[in-house]
Amino acid sequence: MINKYNSFIFDLDGTVYRGESIIPNADKTINHIKQLGKKVLFISNKTTGTIKDYYLFLRNFGLNIEESEIINSTIVVKNYLLKKHPEKKFFAIGEQVFVDELVSAGLNFSNNPKEIEILLITLDRTLNYEKLEIAAKALEYGARFFAANIDDTCPVDGGEVLDAGSTISALEKRTHKKLELHFGKPSEFMMQEIKSKLNNDLSKTLLLGDRLETDILIGNKLGIDTALVSTGVKLYLNGNSEIEPTYHLDSISDLIKNLYPREESNLRPKV
């Protein structure tokens, strides 16, 4: 199967690692693909670390990768705001590392609802009532309503935690304002970043991820083959049955099962 593709796009959280642990044999899989001279790209909706943080985390587990091979939605948001709204003040329901990265790029932060011109929502494990009310009031005063990602949950060791999608739903109900734009998978903004990284060559590309509504959907929109893995979020089929992957895998390590004669392949191509 590896020989069928020249480029491999991997989701990170739930696909390559979960919480603070690497998915078993994910390092061997990715290193083997790179040894074959094939391209790899890692894409994530998670904003609780910088690209360098993710790079060092993966390198610590023995992955032979480059920092330039990683994209997260923070980068996509930052690029958009710097291009379209460089002077506007923003407020974020997000962790401090997310805010700091935007501020360090020259964007202006405010927690005054009357000053906030752009509201950004992303994963925030420090979410509290005060942040929600600042966000709600900013929307009522006319702030634009954006999100770095729209995932409902994020996989962690032992289960899942609430992610941006749940916060977005709460604010939409509280303010009767609708989300305008989001920048993570499966958005057009993330698609453009992927295309740019691969020099607009998506021929013979496989995308692997654990979510139908983000990973598999963006792969389908890009017109490439996809593989849904079972190592991340719990699969909810309701409302998503029309989003179909090319393959179902237990794990990305299924890609190298042919290297281990005692193990049977679990590749199940779509009929």
Image (cartoon, rainbow, N blue to C red):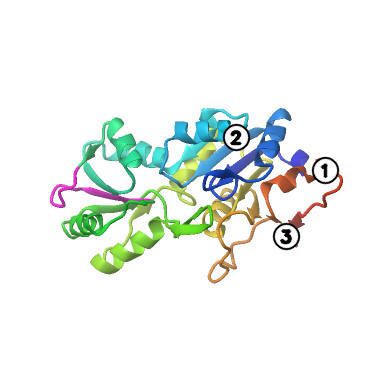
Residue sitting at x 38%, y 48%: 148
Three-letter residue code for mark 3: Lys
The type of residue carrying mark 2 is Phe
- Tell me if residue 118 is in the magenta stretch: yes
> Which amino acid type is marked by label 1?
Tyr
Magenta extent: 110-122
User: Depth check: 56 or 12 in front?
Assistant: 56
Where is residue 257? Give x, y as percent: 78, 45
**Residue furthest right as drawn:** 261
Find numbered disc 3 in the image and state the secondary structure of the residue it sits on.
loop
Residue position for label 1 = 260
49 sits left or right of 31 in the view: left
Q: Earlier in the sequence, mark 1 or mark 3?
A: 1
Q: Quadrant of the N terminus?
A: top right
Q: Earlier in the sequence, mark 3 or mark 2?
A: 2
Give the mark toward the camera: 3 or 2.
2
